[in-house]
Image: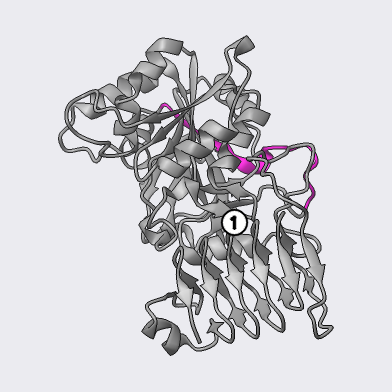
Amino acid sequence: MVLAGGEGKRLMPLTAERAKPAVPFAGSYRLVDFALSNLINSGLRRIVVLTQYKSHSLDRHISQTWRMSPLLGAYVASVPAQQRLGKRWYTGSADAILQSMNALSDERPDYVVVVGADHVYRMDFDQMLEAHIASGMDATVAAIRQPISMANQFGVIEVDDKDPAVISAFREKPSDPKPVPGDDSMALVSMGNYIFTADALIEAITQDGDNDQSTHDMGGDIIPAFVEAGRCGAYDFTFNEIPGATPRDKSYWRDVGTLDSYYDAHMDLISTMPIFNLYNSEWPVYSQQINMPPAKFIHDSEGNQGRTHDSIVSLGVVVTGGIVERSVLSPNVRVGSRSLITDSILLDNVQVGRDSTVRRAILDKDVRITDGASVGVNRERDLERGFTVTDSGLTVIPKGQLVAP
């Protein structure tokens, strides 16, 4: 079960017209593709994606891209909020599963894998499933080590001193996170991925639905209930082995819940030895195959050569006499003469005119930068024009905007 109903307020304006899992990533992908690719590569082929918030583009992407052969009962199905329990939408991630309980009753599985849809990572869930079965626990939480200074942004896992595979406490975004035993600089945090014994999950979700005091959240209510009962284990992501992984990108995981983390995750891709390697053919990331011509870099009429450095360039891109450095260009982007694009992310169909500058910016789909315009050069000017500028100085322009000098 893929939880894909999140609103993604911290990613505004990228989520103004789409669900967070549908946000484009790395040129050719959407965020949901990473969770689905991990499940498929792990041999899990019966998948429902629970959607809610502005889900049209997400539903369309799933229906067009994730078509499985029905011969062995495989499927990826988008399941919108159905109001099965009354005239209300999902009130939390646990309520999403409660209102989609028919998916479990139809399949009658022994175990249920529940994952988020907005993280960038590679993971073999079959290894986690084996660990869950061997532990005898009712629930297992995938855990990753994060600097203790950042742990207050996550659900922090505290493990039993005698058995580090057993969770003794689970605290949501604590101000005083407890470090990993033996390493005061790191804390163990939840990745938002869980495996449950099916009967135990159904019982817990049903009881939670009857509790008026609950927020009906997987991390805030369901997991703490299993921990309190002594029936919740931790799976250390460090031990997950991915075919084709290198020491540099092993155990990579990014929560791209903010504009800055979304941007940083893109920058992780473009180095010569990337921190996250999209080119691992032994554990591929799948997505929709678009029908576009190859990218092209050409001279303009004045002899200026279009060129790129340390960048990802997608199909259909044409760079005419401009320069692109340390950037990600999504399909069908156009860059004009003498323009300079640096440290930026340009989504589909962005057009940059002549003599323009784009610096440390995210341009959503169909943005048009007219001749001589600049973005990311003057913070005050960007704010005056109504653009989003983060505390770190990252400028974000929403979908379809026209930017004049």
Residue at 29 percent of width and 27 percent of height? 82
The color scheme shown is one colour
Can you tell which quarter of the image residue 139 is in? top left
Residue 272, given in percent of the width and then of the height, sits at 81, 64
Q: Determine which residue is flagged by label 1.
A: 183
Inspect the image, locate mark 1, and give the three-letter code of the amino acid beneath it: Asp
Question: As drawn, is 34 to the left or to the right of 117?
Answer: right
Can you tell which quarter of the image residue 352 is in? bottom right
In this rendering, the answer to whether 350 lies above or below 302 is above
Element marked by disc 1: loop
Res. 32 in view: yes
In this rendering, the answer to whether 154 lies above or below 404 is above
The one nearer the camera, 44 or 318, is 318
Residue 376, given in percent of the width and then of the height, sits at 53, 81
In this rendering, the answer to whether 342 lies above or below 112 is below
Residue 56, given in percent of the width and then of the height, sits at 41, 41
Residue at 27 percent of width and 36 percent of height? 90
> Is 81 included in the stretch rendered in magenta?
no
Residue at 55 percent of width and 84 percent of height? 374
Residue at 70 percent of width and 54 percent of height? 276
In this rendering, the answer to whether 392 lies above or below 133 is below
Q: Residues within 10 Å of mark 1 (few under 14, many from 20)?
A: few
Res. 225 in view: no
The one nearer the camera, 57 or 174, is 57
Magenta highlight range: 231-247
Can you tell which quarter of the image residue 34 is in? top right
Question: As drawn, is 130 to the left or to the right of 9?
Answer: right
